[in-house]
Image: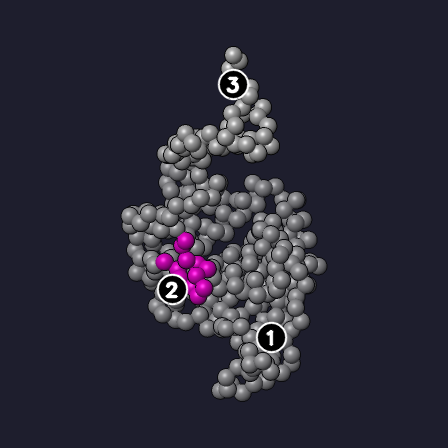
Amino acid sequence: MSPAIAALLLAGVSQAAPLPPPAPPSAQVGEAPAASPPAATPHGRPRHARGDSLEGFNRRMFATQQGFDRRFFRPAAMGYKHVVPKPVRSGIRNVFSNLGEPIVFLNYLLQLKPGKAAETLGRFMFNSTLGIGGLVDVAKLPAIKLPHRPNGFGNTLALYGVKPGPYIFLPFVGPSTLRDLLGGQADGLVLPLAVGSPFDRLEYQAPRAVLTGLDTRAEADDDLRALFAGAVDPYATLRSVYLQNRVAEIQRLRGTRAKAAGGELDDPLADPASGATAPASDAPELSDPLADPAAISLPTATATPAPSERESAPELADPLTDPAASQANPRTPNPSSTPLP
């Protein structure tokens, strides 16, 4: 996952519901023997979720980040958004994104994807020249069609079979796994080691971290508020979103469909090219809006009742006939219908 996506998932969690209390001290990290299986509650359930063996530590870090965001980070990000004009913010965002394209290019080469690497190199050249050093993202225009594709060493490690390891949440880093955390650190070392100055200097790295963090936090505020608005457990919600997103990214990189336990990532729609026909639905919102409602509601063929059935139907009987008289003497003709002599 790219640093921008990680920051997006990290920021704004203070808008969520209050965190549940952390696990009991006996369940926290470092108190169980390393070789023993996860401790269980009296009901036989593990104290941490699957894949989150550091849950006690992660929840404490999540609470720390939540307090920092509520008191400092979100107010600063919203102030940045209101003070700095949008074209300036977009230009700064584009410059730093363009400086990350060589890292994307390198990882596509390591993943043996020369086509994607060539497209990334072309995008970098277009934006660095026609885009005035990356201030304008001209490569994504319809005439060029070279959009940004996030990639990094975390993806490369996953593509070669490295397992994600335990889920980790760290303040100022956000949700990650051991594999993605190491991969992100490798991404950050490429330019300082390969190019040197100014990428290895604090005068560059500190403003970059502050500006990209504030911009990402401000742009993601509405989406994050919606994500956490109904969350019973914000920590678990963030963990689930991150892990599912990473599964989808890796599977997409491999060119296969993402499958996860429970089917939450399965595509519910059949492939039109396979020739499979979707089952018919009687839902009114899915019906043809141009179809005649009367034609739909009426059957195609209606049996005509026999004459005797029509005569005996109460809705077709003579409304002036006395029902009591007809029931008392059904064989007596109606006087009103007898001709006078």
Residue at image position (33%, 47%) is 277
According to the picture, the residue beneath numbered tag 3 turns out to be 338
Q: How crowded is mark 1: few (under 14 residues within 10 Å), some or many (20 or more)?
A: many
Query: In terms of image quadrants, where is residue 69?
Result: bottom right
Marks 1 and 3, how far apart at CA: 99 Å
Q: Which of 97 and 272 is in front in this view?
A: 272
Residue 61 rendering spot, x and y as whole percentages:
62, 69
Marks 2 and 1, how far apart at CA: 29 Å
Q: Badges 1 and 3: C-beta atoms under 8 Å apart? A: no
Marks 3 and 2, how far apart at CA: 102 Å
Sequence-wise, the earlier of marks 1 and 3 is 1
What is the span of residues highlighted in magenta in the rendered image?
A: 257-268
Depicted 40 relative to depicted 128: above or below: below
Depicted 316 relative to depicted 152: above or below: above
Q: What element carries label 1?
A: helix
- Is residue 130 inside the magenta stretch? no
Residue at image position (55%, 78%) is 45
In the rendered image, is residue 70 in sight? yes
Sequence-wise, the earlier of marks 2 and 1 is 1
Q: Which of 185 and 33 is in front in this view?
A: 33
Residue 281 rendering spot, x and y as whole percentages:
42, 45
Instruction: List the single residue furthest toward the right.
Output: 71
Going by the numbered disc 1, the residue's amino acid type is Gly
Q: Residues within 10 Å of mark 3 (few under 14, many from 20)?
A: few
According to the picture, the residue beneath numbered tag 2 turns out to be 156
Residue at image position (47%, 44%) is 283
Going by the numbered disc 2, the residue's amino acid type is Thr
